[in-house]
Amino acid sequence: MDFQGEFELLLRACYPLLYIPTCEEERVEAVIRDCAQKLGNRAVYCWDFVEGYQGNPNSEGVGKRNPLQALELVEKLPANIGGIFILRDFHRFLEDIAIARKLRNLARSLKSQPKNLVLLSPDVRIPAELTEVITVLDFPLPARSEIQAEIQKLLLTMGQTLDSKLLEELARSAQGLSLERIRRVLTRCLASHGHIEPEDVELILEEKRQSIRQTQILDFYPATERISDIGGLDNLKEWLLRRGGAFGERARSYGLPYPRGLLLVGIQGTGKSLTAKAIAHHWHLPLLRLDVGRLFGGLVGESEARTRQMIALAEALAPCIFWIDEIDKAFAGVDGRGDGGTTSRVFGTFITWLAEKTSPVFVVATANNIQSLPPELLRKGRFDEIFFVGLPSEQEREAIFNVHLSRLRPHNLPAYDLKRLAYETPDFSGAEIEQILIEAMHLGFSQNRDFTTDDILEAASQLIPLARTAQEQIQQLQAWAAAGKARLASRDSRFNGLL
């Protein structure tokens, strides 16, 4: 049931106190007025602290700077006369003992009257004594169809039309924004060049980045890396390419469900984070990066509320890629010792969402230490697949050198002996290969010449790879992968002869 249907049902059922957490006052009030007309043209009264009641000549200015007087007006109206009383920002007064007591008294008397109080607030703040009498009703951000209708309405006023493909792209890029923000950014496009064009999608995405920044939980991460920037990992790349069109309408018509996500487990510096960025770029989807540390707040219940906010925001921005880097560190304390069970509750909310979500949010989680991951996270149903990303083989190292040198020295690539470089760097990860190339560039730059294959080998001889400094941990990880616990990301996977 959509919001309007549920709201009308609660009005007919005489729910006296309704609480709607939303920043879209104008939009939700328009929906409430539509519902009021359908239910016998009930009167709608709007109140705020500065102006008091507005829009009704018999109550104009009543309750100005006096929230208790605003509630007393409800009692003064005859019991048989219906009305919906919209109280803006009323959450700020709920801690007042007089206001709380008055609301509880009204909840009793309004059960048999066609009157309803609707409290509007940006977030949910309900004192314990009011939880039994207040019903919270979520007001979702505009759906794609609503966004398309708003775009077409704006275009109609400008005498412009758009082809269906661009209209669909604009609506999809605007998902997750309030209707007011969408109007604002579209007006900016029209003010800039008099019409809407394909390049304006980037302006909408910038508005979305601004919206996400304000939450301070998710980051809108720029994804410029391509699948071709990943050296090796052929099994993983093939799996991703096969699912490239799974978010489109053609896939829905075929009966395919949305892909759920990936868990990438492996040695540090082997390209797990790079893969998350490349997926977003290849699938043309926004990349949201979760900083798990921001989820945990100091107040009781704050962490759980932020987790629900994070999930709601991700689903509102769908379809999107939801990237959780180093998830093993985020939930290492899931046993709850020392934090009053906060980590356990946040983790429980998160994995329940992973299992039950139906929205097109593709979750990419990366982990280095499989031993610290709770077993509930690894069971089937949370992710579509778990891939092990190991150290690159000689052939893959050659591909990695080729990727980096093609970017650094595209005009001089044949001068580098890629096969020799790959052969001379056993146990090196992709990140370590990138580091020795930077060191080789420093060598060449300090001597006023270009760097050579010998400079790269010199840099490699001075770097001790992680495969040697953390040999025991890597052995355990490789043993876990060799036991068939995860799918291998590379066709030419190797375990360095350590098993």
Image (cartoon, rainbow, N blue to C red):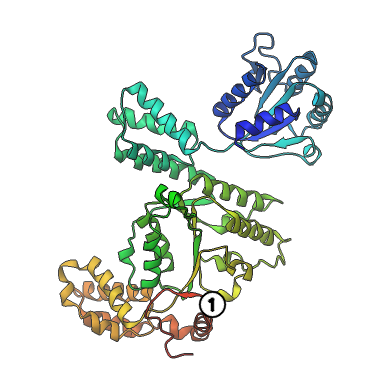
Image position of 128 with respect to 154: above or below: below
Quadrant of residue 229 within the rendered picture: bottom left
Secondary structure type for disc 1: loop
Image position of 361 with respect to 5: above or below: below
Asked if residue 449 shows in the view, the reply is: no
Which image quarter is the N terminus in? top right
Image position of 94 with respect to 319: above or below: above
Q: Is residue 376 left or right of residue 266?
A: right
Quadrant of residue 333 within the rendered picture: bottom right
Q: Amino acid at mark 1?
A: Lys
Q: Is residue 256 left or right of residue 21?
A: left
- The 10 Å Cα crowd at callout 1, few under 14, some 14 to 19, many 20 or more, is few
Q: Which residue is mark 1?
A: 485
Q: Residue at x 65, y 18 (%)?
A: 44
Q: Nearer the viewer, residue 51 or 373?
A: 373
Q: Residue at x 29, y 82 (%)?
A: 422
Q: Residue at x 57, y 53 (%)?
A: 357
* Whole-percent x, y for residue 364 in the image: 48, 61
Q: Nearer the viewer, residue 249 or 283?
A: 249
Asked if residue 114 shows in the view, the reply is: yes
Q: Residue furthest top?
A: 57
